[in-house]
Image (cartoon, helix red, strand yellow):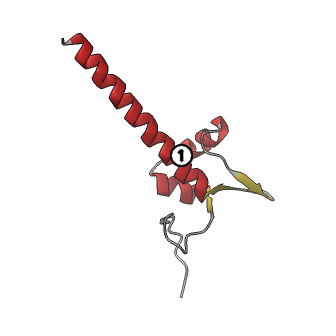
Amino acid sequence: MSKSKSSAVNPSSPQAPRLLSIRQAAGVLGISRTLAYELMASGQLPSVKIKRRRFIPRESIEHFIAQLSASSTATNLSGAHEYEATNV
């Protein structure tokens, strides 16, 4: 049996690795590898280095998604208040 090079990883699976490659993390987030590297460089997506390889902890991905959700909710709520204030 040969292993496929699939980058699809279910981060909530109990068998999911705790550290994901950049390609795997980008696949989970639905973003390009380039954007994943940009997020790491900006500190928005923390990573760890083991020898010459860089990995993204599963917890970093979960935290990043939670931050996006919180930011999106705050933006939507503030936008609703602006709309109400201008249309009263």
Quadrant of the rendered image containing residue 15? bottom right
Residue 68 image point, x, y percent: 46, 40
Secondary structure under the numbered disc 1 in the rendered image: helix
- Note whether 15 is above or below 54 in the view shown: below
Q: Nearer the viewer, residue 53 or 40?
A: 40
- Note whether 38 is above or below 88 in the view shown: below
Q: Nearer the viewer, residue 56 or 79?
A: 79
Residue at 55% over, 60% down: 24
Q: Nearer the viewer, residue 61 or 52?
A: 61
Residue at 59% over, 55% down: 59
Residue 57 image point, x, y percent: 63, 57
- Note whether 43 is above or below 88 in the view shown: below
Q: How many marks?
A: 1
In the visual, does 38 lie left or right of 51? Answer: left
In the visual, does 24 lie left or right of 84? Answer: right
Residue at 49% over, 57% down: 27
In the visual, does 25 lie left or right of 52? Answer: left
Residue at 59% over, 40% down: 39
Residue 88 image point, x, y percent: 18, 11
Residue 78 image point, x, y percent: 36, 24
- Residue type (three-letter) at the residue carrying disc 1: Phe
Reading the image, the residue beneath label 1 is: 64
